[in-house]
Image: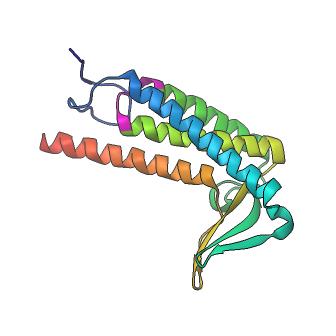
Amino acid sequence: MKSTETGGTGGGASSPSVPSSPRWRLIGLITALVVLVVDQASKAWILYWLELPVRGSVAVMPFLNFTMVWNHAVTFGMFGGHGRWLFIIISTLAVLGLLVVLLRSRRRLVSLACGGIIGGAIGNVIDRLQYKAVVDFLHFHVGGWSWYVFNIADSAIVCGVGLWLLDSFLVERRSQHG
């Protein structure tokens, strides 16, 4: 007989319909590893095969360029000038905290979210250690509108936060209607 969640970690009320299974924790860890590998491989490709630091920008599609940006700050260039070691320490502490949440989590979306955020954060920490800045290169634009340049790690972090918010919304909705 499978046990069901009656409480625990994951950011909100529990749902009796979600099985307590270490399988989702493993999937969260695998997600972190996949994000990390894809992020680092894409950055190596951009830097060493495409040689984007020399080329500056390459049009890929009418709405997408690969544009080289060395990000010395955090998201959207915030808090620039505070030193890379501060960002490395904060990111590492966040990863450790998220690992604890992941290993205690009993919810699928929280496990996947933690995995995405952990993999992305580690990817950006590796950049800061190796290059003293984060390698950003994805530049989406339409007409006169342009988004900030970002990378795979940033995408995984944003998607992870979105999944976690979705999980919180779904759990809250179930508790109100169940």
Q: Nearer the viewer, residue 24 or 177?
A: 24
- Residue depicted at x 82% and y 48%: 132
Residue 48 vs residue 172: left or right? right
In the rendered image, residue 128, in percent from the top left (x then y), is placed at 77, 45
Does residue 135 lie above or below 147 as drawn? above
Question: Furthest-top residue in view?
Answer: 1
Q: Which quarter of the rendering shows the C terminus? A: top left
Q: Quadrant of residue 151?
A: bottom right
- Residue depicted at x 74% and y 40%: 126
Does residue 47 lie above or below 146 as drawn? above
Question: Furthest-front residue in view?
Answer: 49
Residue 105 vs residue 50: left or right? left
In the rendered image, residue 58, in percent from the top left (x then y), is placed at 73, 72
In the rendered image, residue 134, in percent from the top left (x then y), is placed at 74, 52
Residue 167 vs residue 122: left or right? left
- Residue depicted at x 80% and y 56%: 49
Does residue 104 belong to the magenta stretch? yes
Does residue 111 lie above or below 75 as drawn? above
Question: Furthest-bottom residue in view?
Answer: 143
- Residue depicted at x 35% and y 49%: 166
Residue 25 vs residue 38: left or right? left
In magenta, the rendered stretch is: 103-108
